[in-house]
Amino acid sequence: MPTARDIMSRNIVTAKRDMSIKDLSRLFVEHKINGVPVVDDNDKVIGIVTEGDLIDQSKNLHIPTVISLFDAVIYLESGKKFQEEVKRLTGTRVEDIYTPKPVTVSPDTPVADCASLMAEKRVHTLPVVEKGKLIGVIGKFDLIRAMAQE
């Protein structure tokens, strides 16, 4: 049974939290990828940033519905969620838009489990981690390539 180690890409492209959005965009275009792990200074995976995160920066801001009652403003939706959305839309660095605590797999994870994780969790990039170290990445294309070889 094939495992993550068998299909993962070993040419790993990563981003750092302080990387600019412009540099991240160039990285995606240059390497023709749709997501990268975000690593700290010790190369530990701390998050994931995808083309979806970049595209979200161009969407319209949804202003939460509020009601006014006796000179008070009451949010009918989460004010915290609104603040997070503003931060993402106005962000200039990877740390403003990345998703922390990404779904990861070990090198021995069966390919079928990787596919299930990607489908169920709606993720498109799976970092492969061994002993806390990033050793590879599985993208949608890697899974499709594995299917074509079967």
Image (cartoon, grey):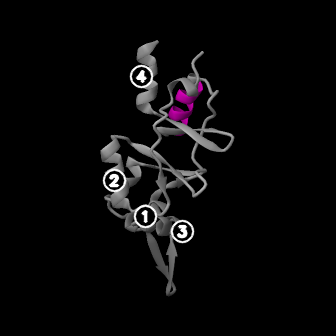
Q: Is residue 29 above or below residue 89?
A: above
Q: Which residue is mark 1?
A: 93
Q: Is residue 33 left or right of residue 115?
A: left
Outermost residue toward the top in this view: 150
Marks 3 and 2, how far apart at CA? 27 Å
- Residue position for label 4: 145
14 lies above or below 83:
above
- Tag 3–tag 2 contact (CB < 8 Å): no
Whether 19 is drawn above or below 133: the answer is: below
CA–CA distance between discs 1 and 2?
A: 11 Å
Q: Position of residue 31 (x, y in %)?
A: 34, 42
Q: Amino acid at mark 4?
A: Arg
Give the residues drawn in magenta, as a range. Answer: 113-121
Amino acid carrying mark 3 in the image: Lys
Q: Amino acid at mark 2?
A: Ser
Q: Quadrant of residue 149?
A: top left
Sequence-first tag of 1 and 2: 2
In this view, the residue in front, 78 or 25, is 25
Tell me the quadrant of the picture where the N terminus can be found: top right
Q: Residues within 10 Å of mark 3 (few under 14, many from 20)?
A: few
Of the numbered discs 3 and 2, the one sitting upstream in the chain is 2
User: Residue 25, which numbered label?
Assistant: 2
Mark-to-mark CA distance, 1 and 3: 20 Å
Structural crowding at the residue carrying mark 4, measured as other residues with C-alpha within 10 Å and reported as few (<14), some (14–19) or many (≥20): few
Coordinates of residue 37 in the picture (x, y in percent): 50, 47
Q: Residues within 10 Å of mark 1 (few under 14, many from 20)?
A: some
Which numbered tag is attached to residue 80? 3
